[in-house]
Amino acid sequence: MRADNTVNECPECKHRLYLDINMLVWRCTNPKCKRIYKYEELSGISVTRVNETEEGKDQYRSETGTGNHKPRESDAHNRFEPSHGSSYRHPANREPSEKSHRVPIIIGITLACIVAVIMFIIFVDPFTPTLSANLPSFYFTVYDGLNPPIQTLEVESSGRAITWSATDDAQWLRLDPVDGSTDEDTLITLSVDVSGLYPGEYDSTITIHTTEAKNTIIDILAKLRITETKETLGIKEAVLGTADNLEIYYDIQPPTGDYNLVNNPNATNPTWEELLQFITSDDTDKEPYIEDIYMCGDFAETLHNNAEQEGIRAAWVGIHFADDIIGHALNAFNTIDEGVVFVDCTGGGFDVVAPSFGDIQIHESDYDRIAYIEIGEDYGAVALEIAEWPQYTFYEHYEYQWERYKKRVERFNIRAEEYGVRVEEFGRRVDEYGRAISSGTYDYATLQMMSLDLEREAEELERETEYLNEEADYLNQLIQDLGYYPLESLGVVSDIKILW
């Protein structure tokens, strides 16, 4: 810091000098001169500091002499005493009153610091460790119906090792281990089991507890999002469905109609045989179909509730057909051995379900059928006792057998008609042969030829009779095997809605 203290004159140019405290030299104020003098060079100049001016600057006086220069005495508060190696020094003695004022201040500051330290220890507590985890939340996503990859949670301590225990509030989440110490294995494996879960979002809270840390509990969020399950994927594969034409819901009511589906939380998926036994014993199909009063949706509601009451998990199904505003309702069951099975128990009076052949009688008291559904294909229904398996391939095989039966019946009828014509012709020729013998019109050779022709014709008719009888027996057996429910298709399925 530079001082503005000045003395009288520069020995060279007679301009005033000022003291540069930083460099401990005297400088001339003349810009042209700019001489610098050390203290020893100004032995003939005496410097005295006088009172400050109104501008706050120290003024100095100098007295010149012929040989000896003696500085003027300054006051006790502003004395400047040059010494060897230094141009100034502060007064050595202080007034006693200054010390007396400083001591209380020092004591107060010391006490304030001590109190601050004590408060810091009380409230911050730097000696007790803090419990923490590596992540505040975990997210699991299921797209393929399989359990998602495991994740790990690390329990940490800010200080010494502490013991902890872990719990969660979800059945689908598993923690391993559930307790430990931060100086040992602090990693908790988080695994998810989606068995029995449906598409949707699930939340869980993982709680880490300890009694040895400042924060005794920390909560960590675990979220699970399921877009597909094995069940939904299995149904999509079975019906060739996509997100555009297949909707699967859980725990909701049908969007139309006054239906009340009652689910049993303890109901389970049946086997194929268990389902057949239940459908056979259930009497829902014996109710009459009454237009606008008790229709297919009501049959499906009744069968659903009956199955759930029996502990069998069931779904209400609504389907629509291409180019037809009229839909149909039935039921679905997810069997554990054959996959999804559709059941149609709509009773007698459903006009659309008409027999394919006018001469085939429909059983009056049994309308239980296994329904066969694929998007873009004909809706099929086969009698319960005839359906050998629930996949759509059986319906295709069943339809092929019926087409084969119809063609054989057509061929049989044609041959039977031809057989009748030949029998009539044979009878006419037999009569003609008898008249020829009695009238003597033909000679022996001609009559012998006529007799041989009749014998050959009789043999052919006999063989044809045997064939027709065998074919008739086969067709009768085939119709028994195919059953008495060759129902016409309701149409080509365009979309499906399944409500579990």
Image (cartoon, rainbow, N blue to C red):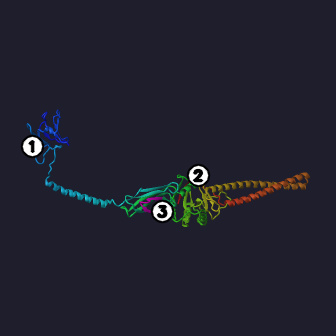
In front of the other: 417 or 169: 169
Please give the name of the residue rendered at 47% of the width and 59% of the height, measured from the top-left corner: 189
Residue type highlighted by circle 2: Gly
Write down the quadrant of residue 98 in the picture: bottom left
**Horizontal and vertical percent for residue 138?**
44, 56
Residue type highlighted by circle 3: Gln
- Magenta span: 175-190
Question: Disc 1 marks which residue?
Answer: 72
- Which numbered mark, 1 or 3, is in the foreground of this view? 1
Q: CA distance from mark 2 to mark 3?
A: 40 Å
**Horizontal and vertical percent for residue 342?**
58, 59
Position of residue 45 relative to residue 110, above or below, is above
Residue type highlighted by circle 1: Arg
Write down the quadrant of residue 219 in the picture: bottom left
Q: Earlier in the sequence, mark 1 or mark 3?
A: 1
Q: Secondary structure at mark 3?
A: loop
Residue 394, can we see it?
yes
| Classed neighbour count for the residue bearing mark 1: other residues with Cα under 10 Å, few (<14), some (14–19), many (≥20) | some
Question: Disc 2 marks which residue?
Answer: 376
Quarter of the picture containing the N terminus is top left
Contact, mark 2 vs mark 3 (Cβ under 8 Å): no
Question: Disc 3 marks which residue?
Answer: 171
**Horizontal and vertical percent for residue 33?**
16, 33
Q: Secondary structure at mark 2?
A: loop
